[in-house]
Amino acid sequence: MSSSDVARQPDPSRSLSLSGHVGFDSLPDQLVNKSTCQGFCFNILCIGETGIGKSTLMDTLFNTNFENFEASHFEPQVKLRAQTYDLQESNVRLRLTVVNTVGFGDQMNKQESYQPVVDYIDRQFESYLQEELKIKRSLHSYHDSRVHACLYFISPTGHSLKSLDLVTMKKLDSKVNIIPVIAKADTISKSELHKFKIKIMSELVSNGVQIYQFPLDDETVAQVNTAMNGLLPFAVVGSTEEVSVGNKMVKARQYPWGVVQVENETHCDFVKLREMLICVNMEDLREQTHTAHYELYRRCKLEEMGFKDTDPESKPVSLQETYEAKRQEFLLELQKREEEMRQMFVQRVKEKESELKDSERELQNRFEQLKRLHADEKAALEEKRRLLEDDQSSFGKRRAAAQLLAAQNLTSNGKKDKDRKNSGFM
Amino acid sequence: MIERPETAVPSIAQRNLEGYVGFANLPNQVYRKSVKRGFEFTLMVVGESGLGKSTLINSLFLTDLYSKDYPGPSQRIKKTVQVEQSKVLIKEGGVQLTLTIVDTPGFGDAVDNSNCWQPVINYIDSKCEDFLNAESRVNRRLMPDNRVHCCLYFIAPSGHGLKPLDIEFMKRLHDKVNVIPLIAKADTLTPEECQLFKKQIMKEIQEHKIKIYEFPDTEDDEDSKLIRRIKEKMPLAVVGSNVVIEVNGRKVRGRQYPWGVAEVENGEHCDFTVLRNMLIRTHMQDLKDVTNNVHYENYRSRKLAAVTCNGVDASKARGTLTKSPLAQMEEERREHVMKMKKMETEMEQVFDMKVKEKKQKLKDSEAELERRHEQMKKNLDAQYKELDEKRRVFEDEKVNWEAQQRILEQQKLDASKTMEKNKKKGKIF
């Protein structure tokens, strides 16, 4: 869809009448031929509990056999599985992407069940937005993966919606066109069904859930759309097996008590769903996704990123100015960060330096202390040594004196003896 | 959590339908919606005055776009090149078309025509700019498409070739808008002259590498044959007329001459019908698509590249064109973060190393200090020991000597005692 087709306002230009056939009434045909050549694309998301019949319904709806995986009830988290198929009906090529939820409603705690779905839808929007914002972009050849329709499968309890249903639909109603369907409708009787539908619609209304309404602006389809809007939600039955009814083979489910024919409008609303979803309003679903849901996402995203249409003085700001301003801001921020980091390092270096200086000083002190200790010890040693020397010298003196005395005594004694000896001789 | 990576091209399987589905009705849905929306088209006509531009427009759209009440630009006196637009709403077969005709009175009329294309370029660019701004708003709602979808360039029927102004203009505009050159007032050329003139013009167009509007290839054989025939007739030689004349009982638009009537819609007289069919009946949508997908995108990428690559040199800029300016900033931010991380680790390394060095030095001097201290202590201890030993020896010696002295003293005492005794005994006289 080219961005020039988003919306046009009626122009207050003058009307002129033509005096002949100009030929621009072929414009819609030119447009259609182009689109048909390019091929169409449609993305449908099915949300519902495991085993509720999503894959079967898709197979029945598109009259083909998509790759189906039987899911277990023990998935720890809700996952989404997307598969893309190329289909062709007469000369119209359709690239269909079917997205199924796996494990929805199986967990004990279902509080976060809707999150993977919301994330998936947002991712497709984001992908488109990124492409749209690129400098060199190729929107006309972009494979549009945005979800165009969301079939929400309601369990045929016959009573009311489950709280999981309400919570999920509330989270999704501003992001995607929600078409609720009552699954396995062959388990509900007609009267129960009527009450069930009324209950569901009133619950949706009272909870403020916006489901997709078939458009009424085009006179050619307004009538049928109005009627169908009143029959929502559609109660569907899916089957790919054929049963012989009368002399035809029809898609049906065979029970001991009878055959539920999928395409019999008295048995279920399958035909209505196919009519509305595919035949009549497929293009509108795509348009709504692009002009309403995607625009909302885009607006929120851009506002989040700080873009505004007018600057604080309420003057309109062009895209260039915004980008330039952002770029300036961005560069300043980078510079600031660098500065901060540098500052931090300078700080650390200072701190560490002072720490080391302290250690040095401490060491120095210790050194001084030890020196002093050593000096003291040395002094003590010297003192001791001196004491010893004093003692030694005083002892030496004593000894010398004693020896002298002894020597004197000896000589005097010797003299005495000698005298004695000598006196004895006389 | 999606099981298939979305960035990869989805693997696409073919499926055959086993019955009625109904999406074959999609084209009808598209048709319905497009009719409801209505269509827009902006056509620009450029050429010297008097070449019959207004008349041609009136003939093309079978209406009096320019009339007594709204006179064509050539009826007005102008001094410089103007760009004027007229918007009209025309309806046919339930289809509503808002047609904008952009005229350029004064083009090529001055004596000095250098830069006379500038107002035209400015106009085209300003419409693209308007669209770009509208498309880039946060709140987008009404986006009227006023971009110029087609530019009919009128070549004067000189019969010789293109004038320098023609070449210059087309060269400057072929990148901005779909250019369709026309030979104006073709009723002044005989068929042979016309043939030669066309050949000459096409030759010159190719020589100067001018890209005029090209018809897209189709898969349909019939259509390709048609397109080839049209291509052979390029540039189309046209004649326009506001007057309806009766010829052989038929009412036709034409120009009455004494020698006959040049019918506008007669394929043998001129290529008008070819132009009308091509421009309006078969390729109007394609002209819009080429404008949107090629010319506008060129303008946009030039404009946005200028914004984001401010200060970035061209060689770096090349790889950035595949991203949006914001994604570009994100990438730059990431690069910067990595750079900072690297810087940080480097600075950390240097810091750690220096700290280690310093600490090691400190440790070494501490060890040295310890070692010296130990040594000195050892030394001192040895000295102490030595001293103690000396002291001990000394003490021993002293004690011994004192003991000896005491013995000697005792001996002496004993001796003197004995002597006394002996004396007393008279042994000694």
Image (cartoon, coloured by chain):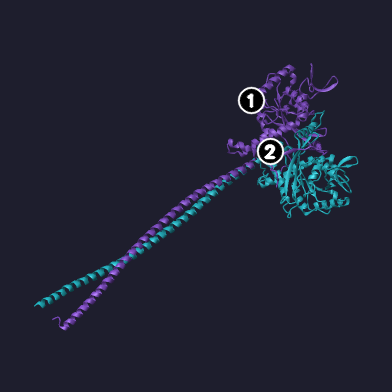
Left or right? Give the position of B1 relative to B256.
left
Residue B112's disc is 1
Residue type indicated by callout 1: Asp
Q: The chain coloured cyan carries which letter?
A: A
Number of the front mark, 2 or 1 = 2
Q: In the displayed structure, would residue B340 be above or below residue A400? A: above
Residue A387: x and y, percent?
30, 68
Secondary structure of residue under mark 1: loop
Front-most of residues A132 and B204: A132
Residue A284: x and y, percent?
79, 41
Residue B374: x and y, percent?
39, 59
Q: Chain of mark 2?
A: B
Viewer can see residue A40:
yes
Q: The chain coloured purple carries which letter?
A: B
Q: How many marks?
A: 2
Query: Residue lying farthest top?
Result: B259
Instruction: Place residue B262 in its image quadrant.
Output: top right
**N-terminal of the two: label 2 or label 1?**
1
Q: Are marks 2 and 1 on the same chain?
A: yes
Viewer can see residue A383:
no
Q: Contact (CB < 8 A) between labels 2 and 1?
A: no
Residue marked by disc 2:
B132
Front-most of residues A351 and A117: A117
Query: Residue lying farthest right?
Result: A246
Q: Residues within 10 Å of mark 1 (few under 14, many from 20)?
A: few
Report the Cα–Cα distance between label 2 and label 1.
34 Å
